[in-house]
Image (spheres, helix red, strand yellow):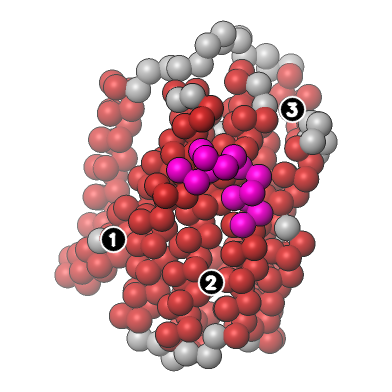
Amino acid sequence: VVLWAVADSLGDPTMPPLFAESVGESQRGTAFSLFSLTWFLPGFYSYLVAGFLADSYGGHIILRILLVTEVASFLIFVVFVRETLRGRKPVDLRGIADNFRELLRPRGGLGSFYALAILNHLSWALLAGTFVGMVWRSFDLTLTQIGMLLNAFTIVAALSLLPMGKLVDRFGSRRPLILATALTCLLFTSYYLSTEFLSLLLAQILRGVSVALIEPASNTYLSNAVPEAERGKFFGSLNGLKGLASFPAPIIGAFLFEVYGFQGAALAGLICSLMA
């Protein structure tokens, strides 16, 4: 788990700049949608296939498949992906301390964007790690129904990403960010009011649309707002701040669930999204 976390901490600030540098500014919304699509397309089948294999052969077969796919991904990246950054700079180890100081003081007008991104991430983190357990205990759902909830989110997100990316390319990032945040508020309101499987399913569909819009909009906004040579640093600092701010969120969400039920955790997410 620690090694996985280290890998993610290296990958998160490097992949968005790589995509941003590979296309023109007017095409970045679509590019980031395609980038996110690679994460959501497996949701069409992965839950069903993984569950079947685990039931039939045990959980270790899933880990072996993960190892094979990760090695294949590594080889494809090394052989086919080329560096697109212009004007490379040497690594300045002494500048790491300055980066940590900048982490707490976003440059220029990015403070509001950082606050939006952090609050939005926090609202999701309150439920993300324990969502399955929460709805299973609160609504007495079957495993099939829970699988349908998860698949509804991933399928809708995958189908919505390209249209939402085109929307960002046409109208810019600011208005799609506002719309995505408003949809997130509506989503948590739907969670709070849900009383049965069907209402949860509709909320998951809304979640898919919201995530499909906020991913390309936020990545494009930050890519266009900072110098090309510093994109990795800014994506890294933003992800670091989001991680620090949401570190206790799963525990807080679980505590609210134990005391106030699913509506308590959903209300906390709604408050964070309204602040965003």
Quick check: 63 above or below 129? above
Quick check: 173 above or below 182? above
Of residues 118 and 215, the one nearer the viewer is 215
Task: Give the residue pinned by disc 3.
Answer: 99
Q: In x, y percent, where is residue 60?
A: 26, 58
**Which mark's residue is nearer the viewer, 2 or 1?**
1
Q: Residue at x 39, y 62 (%)?
A: 156
Quick check: 90 above or below 76? above
Q: Earlier in the sequence, mark 2 or mark 1?
A: 1
Looking at the rendered structure, the kind of residue marked 2 is Thr
Residue 224 is at least partly visible in this image: yes
| Residue 245 numbered mark, or none | none
Task: Give the residue pinned by disc 2.
Answer: 130
Q: Badge 2, how many Cα within 10 Å: few under 14, some, many 20+?
A: some
The span from disc 2 to disc 3 (Cα, nearest Å) is 33 Å
Q: In x, y percent, where is residue 55?
A: 22, 72
Which quadrant would residue 35 be assigned to in this image? top left
Residue range (magenta): 166-179
